[in-house]
Image: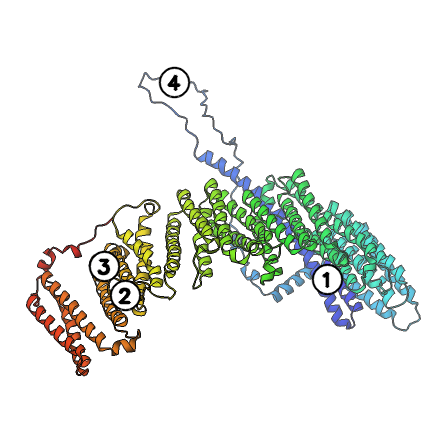
Amino acid sequence: MLWICLLLGGAVLGYSLSYDEWQGMLVGAACGWAVCASVRLYSLRKRSFEQAQQLETTRKTVESLQQRLTLLEFPPVSNFQPVEPAQAPAPLPADAVVVAAHTDGPELIWDLPDEQPLPAKTDESAWRPAPDTRDAAQANPFDSTITRARNWLLGGNTVLRVGVVLLFLGLAFLLRYATEGIVFPIEARYAAVAGCALGLLGLGWWLRHRNPQYALMVQGAGVGVLYLTVFAAMKLHPLLEPSMGFTLLVAITAFSTILAVTQNALALACAGALGGFAAPLLASTGQGSHVALFSYFALLNAGIFAIAWFKAWRVLNLIGFFGTFGIGFAWGINSYTPAMFWSTEPFLILFFLMYLAIGLMFARRKLQETGSASDDPAIQLRKGDYVDGTLLFGTPIVGFGLQYALVEHLQFGAAFSALALGAIYLGLGRLLALRAPGQAALLMETCLALGVVFATLAIPLGLGSQWTTCAWAVEGAAVFWLGMRQERLLARGFGLLLQIGAGAALLNQLDLSYSALLDHGDYWTPMVMAIAALISAWCIHRFNGLTRLDPKLATALLLTWGAAWWAFSLICSVLLFVPEVFQPTWLLIAAAVSVALWATVALRLQWPDLAVLCTALMPVASLLLIGSLRFDYHPAEHWGWLGWLAVIAVHLLTLRKLAPVLPRMAGGLAHILGCWLVIALLALELRMGLMQLSEQHNAWRWLGWALLPSLYLLAMAHPRSWPWPISAQPREYRVWAAAPMAVLMLAWFWLANIFSDGAAAPLPYVPLLNPLELGLLFALAGICLWMQRYLAQLGFSEAVAQRSAQLVVGASLFVLVTAMVMRTAHHWNDVPWDADHLLASMQVQAGLSIVWTLMALALMIGGHLRRRREMWIAGAALIAVVVAKLFFVELSDRGSMARIVSFIGVGMLLLVVGYFAPLPPKQSDREVRNEPDLPSAAEPRQP
């Protein structure tokens, strides 16, 4: 009956409304089939629920039988104590009773049923395997559709179904025949069809107790014929006025609804509801009043509301929901104007409240059915079947969307509407928590979530972006705290999304120009966001992490997010209130105060992650230093000494106080960065002080960079124990902080030798006794001593470390002596300080020959005394270079005293070498290993 009513009813409806009759018929039939499929799915779902209850009952029965069988197969044995053998006891009387030990198992039934006689012949069909149903399950949709149609036609009361189909066809032919030109009046023909429909209804009602299924099919056919008759009387012939036809359709709808409720027939109720919502469409002339339309919908929904009080018919509820809001939406697009607000708004509120209540009544009925059908309701409650998600979420979403369109012309109308929705759902959630705290937990949480969402949505609709940002940030922190406390993943995610949305709202209205940063309202809004993010990070620390995200990663992200907005707020404040020349100083003070505050909180809460954030002071201060650098910059200018003093003091206090909380790696890195920054600040200030000694940019500028780092290398190379903070992290200060400094000092050594002429006015230039070369020797001493002592701790072997140190020192001394000769020629003989003039000067060449020969002499004598052939060979190679230079460079300068001095001096030195430093003999490996090193090459002591 359901297939017939819905398919044929949809086909006739589509045939009448569409310009293309056959296409409309197909579309209408498809819609009818969709409704029928929904009803079928509902019945299958109900049947599945009943089967699940039966399976649960069967499981309990099987478990009880299993316990009884276990007790029968393995009877309990009472405990006994062994005793000494004694005299045989007297025999027990025949009627003695043995009492078994008491057990806690179920009472056993000892009476067995009477033995049944065995069958004389085994039926072969009993052993036949069950048919395989996998092929049927895997059949294609076309075959399954044909199978269902064949089963519907040939299964059950086939004659009745064929008769209903033929009756519909006959009545349709009769209506078609009514359009042909015969003498029989048209009114009589319609009356005959209507009489047949009423007869079918009467027959179905009379048979409702004898054959319920047959009666429902006949009644459905009668309702369908009545709809068809009224529709044809309005559309095909002007027999009924639209108002009369509308009234008849309403009456048919109400009548079918009464029949459905009294007989518990969902199909009749759906047919009545579909007809009721189709009635205004069928009878519409385009000239009706929207008040009358919505009043009619209110009556229809009142009927659905009444049915929902007694029946949990989800399909009927959805028909009413989509019919009401769908037709209302279509009317609003075509006909609504702001002048209709006060006549439309009450109906929208009424429909919203009705379907909110219908959704709640559906949940109530489902909970009642679940509680009465199962001994353990928690098993079914976990499935969430009692909540109709379409009505629960669709009603507020669709209702608010329509409400937004209605109040768009009113100021703050959308904001107050969202706020009202939030209050309704929050109050409803509170009421459910008080009335049914355990049964309706899912429904309560959903209402609370909807209330929070709409209350959140009211903020941007009614306030500006700054208030929206602040409110969302605070709300996000509160919701995240609640989610962490109650271990609810949805609340945590919503809280984080709110904070991200707050940041997006602020960035969306933020102009990154300088003037926008000076807006007086922009410095406290980011601070609120920063505090909210820090509170969320503390929630993770307080409640021991998350379930879906790494707690360390989540905490780091939230702390970074909060610190970024904190810094943005401070930058905006300083740019707004502080003059430009003092802004770097105040930024340093603000950073120091912020880290001091964070360190206090981290120490109070014993929070390692926040303690790690406190170590960001040195990187931030380094960025400020780099941003302030210029040629004449020194850190103490414009009260900068106060800012840098505050930064260094807070840094040292933080490292001292947070040492028990701070992870070792983070603490070590903070020590290293702080060491570098302090040395850089002092070096910059010393450089500026030395530059005051002369107006020209000379050697004093170079010395300012190197004195303090070189002193640091010498101090770290010394084996003495230094006080805190070096004693707290000795390896970090002696190795990791000093290694990059040694590389920089070596680079400075070579660059200063190449580019500086050694001028240190007002002091005169004296070779090896001028400020530049004394500073170079000082730096080289620090590099050499540090390499000898700690280069091996960077992963190099002892032998490689020693040879590397000797090679670096030798090459650096060679460059120093060579540059010293050139600087002497520049200052004493006025040779211009550039490569072309220096290399072309014979005085420079003669000096280089003499000095290089002296260096070769020292190497060869040292190699001879220490029996180091490689040292002697290095000196000999240098001699070869000098001799080659004499013949290729000096020999070309005829008649000059420089050539004479070069040849005579080098020759005499070679005579000395040949006498005092001949080539040392080869040594075996054993002799080399047993030979004690001289103190200059002694292994350094480890600290």
Q: Amino acid at mark 4?
A: Pro
- Give the spatial CA distance, label 1 vs label 2: 108 Å
Q: Is residue 647 left or right of residue 471?
A: left
Q: Nearer the viewer, residue 90 or 320?
A: 320
Secondary structure under tag 1 reads helix
- At x 48%, y 55%, the residue is 638
Task: Choose the circle earlier in sequence order: 3 or 1.
Answer: 1
Residues under labels 4 and 3: Cα distance? 102 Å
- Name the residue type under label 2: Tyr
Disc 3 or 2, which lies upstream in sequence? Answer: 2
Q: Answer yes or no: do the residues labelled 3 and 1 have beta carbons within 8 Å?
A: no
Query: Can see residue 209?
Result: no
- What residue is pinned by disc 3? 801
Seen in the image, is 277 located left or right of residue 623? right
- Which mark is in front, 3 or 1? 3
Report the mark closest to the observer, 4 or 1.
1
Q: Position of residue 337 (x, y in %)?
A: 81, 61
**Where residue 32 is drawn, which disc sits there?**
1
In the rendered structure, which disc, 1 or 2, sits on the residue that comes first in sequence? 1
How far apart marks 4 and 2 lie (CA) works out to 134 Å
Q: Which mark is residue 91?
A: 4
